[in-house]
Image (tube, helix red, strand yellow):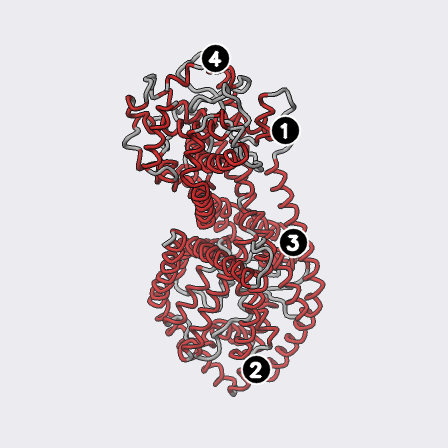
Amino acid sequence: MKMKKQNVRTLSLILCMFSYLLVGAAVFDALESETESARKRMLEQKRSDMKRKYRFTEHDYREIERVVLQAEPHRAGRQWKFAGSFYFAITVITTIGYGHAAPGTDAGKVFCMFYAGLGIPLTLVMFQSLGERMNTFVRYLLSRVKKCLGLHRTEISMENMVLVGFLSCLGTLCVGAAAFSHFEGWTFFHAYYYCFITLTTIGFGDFVALQKKEDLQEKTPYVVFSFMYILVGLTVIGAFLNLVVLRFLTMNSEDEKRDAQERASLKRGRNLTALSLGQENHCHSNLFLPIEEGTSCTNLILSPAEERGLYSPLPLPLNASQSRPQLSSLCSCVCYHLGLCHCSAPSPNKCPECNINSVYCNSVSYKIQGCSSNRNDTVVSSPGSTLSPGLSLRDLPRFRRKSL
Amino acid sequence: MKRQNIRTLVLIICTFTYLLVGAAVFDALESKMEITQKKVLDDRKRELMDKYNLSKVNFDELERVVLQLKPHKAGVQWRFAGSFYFAITVITTIGYGHAAPSTDGGKVFCMFYALLGIPLTLVMFQSLGERINTFVKYLLHRLKKCLGLRNTEVSMANMVCIGLISCMSTLCVGAAAFSRYEDWSFFHAYYYCFITLTTIGFGDYVALQKDNALQTNPQYVAFSFMYILTGLTVIGAFLNLVVLRFMTMNAEDERRDAEQRTLLSRNRQTGGTGTNHCMSDPPSSSTAGHGGGSGKGLCNVYAEVLHFQSMCSCLWYKSQEKMHYSIPMIISHDLSNSDTCMEHSETSDALHSNGCVCSASSVYTGLLSPAHYQRLSKRRSSI
């Protein structure tokens, strides 16, 4: 049995991710293990030297260790005054989560969980919304630039947008790296690493801005800059994700939707054939309308070639056979309502509740009549009628037209 | 102002307000405890310094050593199991920081690793989450059938309810497990699971850091990894159900605006005469005016049809939502069409009862002006 596309896709993604994890683990092991063991040895050596030097008892040393570890967040100054709390709130709702400060009280932990529960979706939607606006604006700017430059084609392709997006991300990271390396005294590379880890919301906490003594409370402009940098940087990254990744997040849903449509249209197609044989007041013909090539399989309208194929014994292109049942079912949707309106009166004016519907159907079909060049006189779709697949328009009784 | 711009501005204001409120509350909750804790620790530190006659410089050195030893205390962090744990925290963006690359090479690789891994993981979790939602919908539908309920459709409310319950139980299961293995209280373990599965990952509580568990307790290690990945899937499924549609709202609105602009510009191009020509000349004249007439007519028809298509899809999706299990993505499209549709609902009660509310209202308001409508009715009599 052939597996659904969505299932195949999901399984391959799972496999990809696991392999990616395995490869990553192996590489990190290779890169860091040796350094780790060397450092560990050195630090333990230092520790035993110190213990010997100061003659700590084991109990006391453990006490010192505890005190030092617990005092770690305090080294950076007050973490929970307003500026620090704001910083913490940012790290919660953006899911960066440095951990440089974490709620110590149980009440703080509880509030943190509720705060995150509402804040994270809000922030996700906000960044995507703003990112989309930015992308649209950039697209507009680019097309103006292209026009000004007098280029031949002023359309913005996806590649243009991806390139611009990528460059903005790099630019943002570099600007941040320059700023933080200056203010925090880090090397450019470490500052870049910090910006990257922050803006991807990983947030290790090995490098954290605003942790030099009392920066949070004293250097207000720098504090404001840091906050704005994080939020703006996340917007830029969010815009890039919106451009490139978001479509993939909805792929399965879109496929599922399309499958459901196909299933239902097939069912309707079958129902239509059954119903069309009996009932007069119901509309039966497809609305065959000439337009440009349809590309998606949800395109309702057949191209002229496909239309002709329906009247002649030419083999139909695949699109037509796919779209025909959809078309009939979709249009029958509208037209069944005409019938259900019990609008057997000749003029729509006498049927108030059907008024708009008939007018609509009429207007569409009139446009069809006027514009369908490859039709002769007889082949005029009666207003709003739908054909079951198989019947041609020719077979429609003439009287329909008069009745409306 | 465009709807998308308003929406975006409102969201920005909401987020900033949310941050301010959060900051104020955290300040109120934590500041006092922070001050008292700092005082206690300072006192203890001074005691120890006095006891051992340590100068400040000495103590700073000691402090440095202790802090640097912290990750090593928890065991070997970069052997394969530890690296795997680290890789998980990178690509899921949890990022505890319990271990972070110390070599520059490690940092560089970490950045590239995250660059490719994070989108891959996002797409994977959403994909798997959507599959889970579909499966749950199916199960629920079968369950409703078995129970002999009259209405066997699975509504959005059902799904959200189930989603919430699964999230809560995932957190509770994890809390129970980790409180046992890590010797935390249930509350602290629950807090750990929550912070982990929302990918915040403070690092104040980290699993697998006691007694060198990473190297000595492989079953527990495997359980932890599977728990994190499965838990993230459950949360991802819930996000896919509830939040994802809002992330595409602006794009959907933008697309619809573009469609409308195209329709309007085409309508203007063909002009009133074009449509008149279209309608007044029945097929007999078509051969003569084939090129021009059908060309203009084509545009007009396309415009009508496009709107018809969108209207029909409104109807279609509305009926489909009842038949098959709701299709979330079309929501903004759906809603905006039904906005125009709702205007007409009072006049078309017969239609409304069928669940297909849109009649011609979207086409009507979009394309046909009342004057146009007059022409139409005149036309009709001519034929």
Q: Which mark's residue is nearer the viewer, 3 or 4?
A: 4
Asked if disc 1 and disc 4 are in contact, CB closer than 8 Å, the reply is no
**Residue A141: x percent and y percent?**
50, 61
Q: Which mark's residue is nearer the viewer, 1 or 2?
A: 1
Q: On the image, numbered disc 1 is attached to which residue?
A: A317
The residues tagged by marks 3 and 1 sit, at their Cα atoms, a distance apart of 45 Å
Q: Relative to the observer, which residue lies in front, B358 or A173?
A: B358
The residues tagged by marks 2 and 4 sit, at their Cα atoms, a distance apart of 94 Å
The residues tagged by marks 1 and 2 sit, at their Cα atoms, a distance apart of 80 Å
Q: Residue at x 66, y 73 (%)?
A: A39
Q: Which mark's residue is nearer the viewer, 2 or 4?
A: 4
Q: On the image, numbered disc 4 is attached to which residue?
A: A277
In the rendered structure, which amino acid carries the disc numbered 4?
A: Leu
Q: On the image, numbered disc 2 is attached to which residue?
A: B61
**Residue B292: x percent and y percent?**
52, 36
SS at badge 2: helix
In the rendered structure, which amino acid carries the disc numbered 3?
A: Leu
Of the residues under marks 3 and 4, which one precedes in the sequence?
3
Asked if disc 2 and disc 4 are in contact, CB closer than 8 Å, the reply is no
Quarter the C terminus of chain B occupies: top left
Q: Which mark's residue is nearer the viewer, 1 or 4?
A: 1
Q: On the image, numbered disc 3 is attached to which residue?
A: A21
Q: Describe residue B115's horizontal placement relative to residue A209 as left or right.
A: right
Residue B213 in view (yes/no)? no
Decide: is B285 above or below B158: above
Q: Quadrant of residue B163?
A: top left
In the rendered structure, which amino acid carries the disc numbered 1?
A: Pro
Asked if disc 2 and disc 3 are in contact, CB closer than 8 Å, the reply is no
Q: Are marks 3 and 1 on the same chain?
A: yes
In the rendered structure, which amino acid carries the disc numbered 2?
A: Glu
